[in-house]
Image: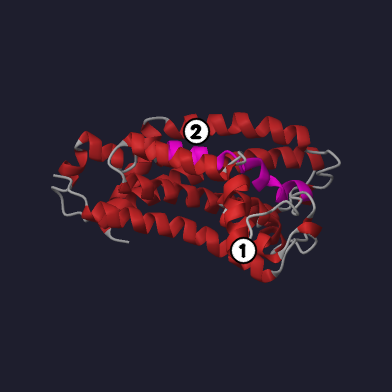
Amino acid sequence: MTSSTRIIAVKEFEDAARSKLIWGLTLVLLVVTVPNFYNMAGSTVLDTAVDATQFLPSIFQNFIAPLAIIAAYRSVVGERESGSLRILFGHPVSRRSIVVGKALGRIALVAAVLLIGTLSLAVIVLLTYGTLPIALFGVISIYIVAYGAVWTGVTVGVSAAVTSRLQAIATMLGLFMFFGPFPIWTNIGLPVTAFVSTGSFSTDYINQLDPGTWPTWYLYAQRLNPMQNFTQSREFVASLVEPSVGYFGSLQVQLFGLGVLVVWVLAPLAIGYWQFERADIT
């Protein structure tokens, strides 16, 4: 990491802290996750501390993407619109340093918020069950933070590629709506994947609640959706330190899913940097 990249990353995090963005995002995250998890803890669905801890990613599933979008959509394009990038270019700094530094700074911001959130839910686990599986909690926390980095990387990549904040927020909201808690992925993405895999758009024979109806291609198709992938991979990640946690699907499917998440963070950043490098900022 170059010194300019590090300086930009630190400045990004400090600016967010001074603007109280980090505290606002933390408050919102706690409001939407803590009551929900508190009501589930100790139920028949989560009857042990291990069950509750490995379930934590599901609590965060629908909230990490909006959190990252709010935290990072202005990261590059906001400074481009305001004209401050031209001032920044007056210093010995490359466009790659700007994109990487802003990505690291915003990832650190989102990570801090998510760590506060996971620690708050850990307190609920400890109070409810009288114990907290430390190793499992540590791995799950890292997994949640890593997923936050995925959506933050996507957002910074989009912010670097577009020319206005409106384009950035519209693109990210479009991605969230397509992959998120709406039937768009099910109605469009899965049929297209089915056609590529089988030659037919039909998915009527698949019951999403019955794994016995899932063909092999569907196991992989699920992992193309980053939000489904996040929850589908959580049991495998938990099993790395807690063998009592079982997971559905072969090792190849699990590794494919984790690989897809890596692609999701790297590809948008690479495309965003490529667009940003070619853009006329003068």
Pick the quarter of the image with the C terminus: top left
Q: Which residues are magenta?
A: 51-71
Question: Which residue is label 2 attached to?
Answer: 25
Q: Residue at x 31, y 52 (%)?
A: 99
Where does residue 95 sit, x and y in percent of width and height? 24, 54
Where does residue 76 sit, x and y in percent of width and height? 30, 43
Q: Residue at x 37, y 32 (%)?
A: 18
| Amino acid of disc 1 | Gly
Q: Residue at x 54, y 64 (%)?
A: 259
Indicate which disc, 2 or 1, sits on the residue closer to the N terminus: 2
- Image check: 100 left or right of 36? left
The answer to whether residue 143 is seen in the rendering is no
Quarter of the rendering containing residue 22: top left
Pick the quarter of the image with the N terminus: bottom left
Magenta segment main secondary structure: helix
Quarter of the rendering containing residue 221: bottom right
Q: Residues within 10 Å of mark 1 (few under 14, many from 20)?
A: few
| Amino acid of disc 2 | Leu
The answer to whether residue 235 is seen in the rendering is yes
Question: Which residue is label 1 attached to?
Answer: 199
- CA gap between label 2 and label 1 equals 44 Å
